[in-house]
Image: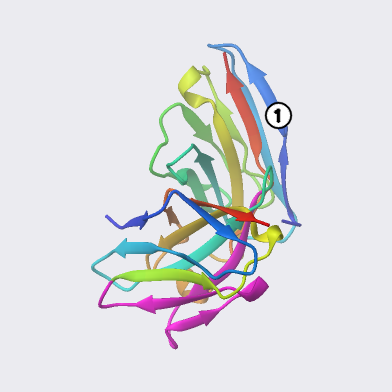
Amino acid sequence: NAGVTQTPKFQVLKTGQSMTLQCAQDMNHEYMSWYRQDPGMGLRLIHYSVGAGITDQGEVPNGYNVSRSTTEDFPLRLLSAAPSQTSVYFCASSLRAGSSSGNTIYFGEGSWLTVV
Amino acid sequence: AQSVTQLDSQVPVFEEAPVELRCNYSSSVSVYLFWYVQYPNQGLQLLLKYLSGSTLVKGINGFEAEFNKSQTSFHLRKPSVHISDTAEYFCAGAKAAGNKLTFGGGTRVLVKP
């Protein structure tokens, strides 16, 4: 998973607190995305970005905000954490938007978030 | 909407035995399919991918998968597993445009000595 860095790796939040999960890649990738992983549900797309200044919603965007001010960084913000947001979060990136180019999607090592 | 279904949530298998992990997809348009592996407390690593061409795809670590359009399946196989293959495996699909992956629920493989 070299190239996609997520911080923090572990975090415990109280209900209502806010926090930002950081994601950075140094591969000059256009496409970045955030997924959450829950048991038995695989990974579900939260938000994604096809380039600096462009973001869009995925399958489960509620409760999360994103921005893409630079190519390298794609932070995920939880404005008011809820227990339902307890999950493992993965950031991913690929060189170009568009699966037809055969891009490999690289995943970070995950951020374990617990909301109590 | 595209969906991906992994038919087995857990697969126990003895070391050196073959294993098959089943994946079915639904889509009305061209589709790209992937298998990822996740070792404990780690991120996802790409095993193999089907974009077009030969329906038999070979990946890393001795894994292979066969794309079957008529059965809308993309099953993953390995002829002889090792203890180190103990992990969770995810099947995923993507539409032609964009890299939005749709994941199956995952299959936990436990290789027993």
Q: Which colour scheme is used?
A: rainbow
Whether residue A30 appears in this view of the structure is: no
The C terminus of chain A, quarter of image: top right
Name the image quarter holding residue B93. Answer: bottom left
Q: Is residue B53 magenta?
A: yes
Residue A115 percent location from the top left of the image:
57, 18
Relative horizontal placement of residue A19, taking residue B55 as reference (left or right): right
The residue located at (67%, 71%) in the rendering is: B61
Residue where numbered disc 1 is placed? A10
x then y, percent, for residue B71: 27, 73
Residues shaded magenta: B43-71
Work out whether B59 lies above or below A18: below
Nearest the eye: A69 or B101: B101
Identify the residue shown where x is 41% and y is 44%: A58
User: Residue at the location (38% across, 43% down)?
Assistant: A59
- Give the mark count: 1
Could you tell me which quadrant the N terminus of chain A lies in? Answer: bottom right
Q: Is residue A100 above or below residue A88?
A: below
Q: Residue B69 in magenta?
A: yes
Label 1: chain letter: A
Residue B29 percent coordinates (x, y):
27, 70
Q: Residues within 10 Å of mark 1 (few under 14, many from 20)?
A: few
